[in-house]
Amino acid sequence: MGCSKWRAAFNFGHLKVQSKLSVFFTMIILFTYLFYCLNGYCDSLPRPVYDQQTNLQNKIILNDGQEASPEQLGAYNASPVSLVREQLSDFSNSDAPSNNISIANNFGSKKFPQAIIIGVKKGGTRALLEFLRIHPDVRAVGAEPHFFDRFYDKGLEWYRNLMPRTLEGQITMEKTPSYFITKEAPRRVFSMSRLTKLIVVVRDPVTRAVSDYTQTLSKSPGLPSFQNLAFRNATTGLIDTSWSAVRIGIYAKHLENWLRFFPLSRFLFVSGERLVTDPAGEMGRVQDFLGLKRVVTDKHFYFNQTKGFPCLKKPEGSSRPRCLGKSKGRPHPQIPSEVLLRLRDFYRPFNLKFYQMTGHNFGWD
Ligand SMILES: Nc1ncnc2c1ncn2[C@@H]1O[C@H](COP(=O)(O)OS(=O)(=O)O)[C@@H](OP(=O)(O)O)[C@H]1O
């Protein structure tokens, strides 16, 4: 009788200890979960398919007119081993797998870009962004978000969500070349942050116009000739400034618009020509402007004779050398020299004004 009483008491005590232990372990699990969630790691948990499908409906335009979803953008940017690279990148010979599975990088947080490549279309903006991406302290959106021109009504949080996660000391970047010519863009970027650094890749406006025309021609082969579009009146040689291929090249006019909001010190003008002839030199200036250590140097580039352009020895997320894709550095159609001369005359005063404004002679005349 005495023995069974002791056994009962022992069992009861044992149960008490057991339940205390289970409460203790449950608390530990709960606290660990809460800690991870507060640090943003919960994002890595698989999400319901319907959630992913909803996100896929928010389409983003790629620079070549394709559409990419914010979901794809996120995957592309978040991961150093970006598996959607093939769809989004302008690199050729991609050695990245072509499925949509990505190794998620859930460290850090999504921030507004501290630096934006705002232009110019066909200036060499893709080359600059891809060269910058090899820098360990730069994280950039692969596709063009077009937030400050096309999707502003989606709100700043939508925009921030497109950004890759960054750690302390890393710079968030994006490029959308049409911002430079968008009237509302300066005010909008300013209201996001007046400290935003603005990079403009500029190229001889005549070659830029031909490059722009070449791109449109590749999509619409029945397009009228360059001269038909460039001249308002062929006999008088009056230039049609309403044609976007011409208008974009009046850099001084677009810059005036930006200078109403940002001081000149907030801009870096990159020479599109030098980005081809001396990529390392131009990248040195860009890294200095961004306050980055000069990590991207001449050892990262080689000149590809077949492509006729500098290519990367080891682009981000790859161990193989890579050049930009076929739509970058493609041959231009032959334009009669008198047409090009007329256009050059047209741009001269605007170019001079631009040199004055920027304090930099780009040598286009
Ligand atoms: N390294 C390298 N490889 C290939 N292409 C290079 C490179 N550096 C600059 N460029 C020039 O970039 C031009 C395309 O400019 P963008 O990237 O700004 O075009 S876009 O606005 O994003 O469509 C592209 O214009 P096109 O030559 O007319 O195709 C190139 O001249």
Image (spheres, rainbow, N blue to C red):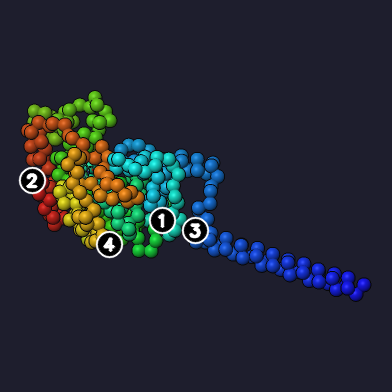
Q: Residues within 10 Å of mark 1 (few under 14, many from 20)?
A: many
- Whether 58 is drawn above or below 1: the answer is above
User: Foreground: 23 or 304?
Assistant: 304
* Separation of marks 3 and 1 at Cα, in angstroms: 10 Å
Check disc 2 and report its element: helix, strand or loop. loop
* Amino acid type for the residue under numbered disc 3: Gly
Q: Are marks 3 and 1 in contact (CB under 8 Å)?
A: yes
Categorize mark 4 by other alpha carbons within 10 Å: few (<14), some (14-19), many (20+): some
Q: Is residue 7 above or below residue 180?
A: below
Which residue is pictured at 34% across the width and 52% down the height? 140
Quarter occupied by residue 14:
bottom right
Residue 304 in the image, given as x and y percentages of width and height: 19, 43
First along the sequence among labels 4 and 1: 1
Q: Which residue is mark 2?
A: 365
Residue that mark 3 sits on: 40
Looking at the rendered structure, the kind of residue marked 2 is Asp
Q: Residues within 10 Å of mark 2 (few under 14, many from 20)?
A: few
Specify whether tag 1 is near ligand 1 (CB below 8 Å).
no
How many circles with numbers are drawn on the protein?
4
Badge 3 or badge 1: first in the primary sequence: 3
Q: Write down the residue under mark 4.
A: 292
Q: Give me the C-alpha separation between circle 2 and circle 1.
A: 43 Å
- Taking depth in this image into account, of 341 and 271 the one nearest to the observer is 271
Where residue 31 sits: x, y (%)?
A: 59, 64
Q: Is residue 136 left or right of residue 231?
A: right
- Residue lying furthest front: 3
Q: Which amino acid is tagged 1? A: Arg
Q: Which residue is mark 1?
A: 165
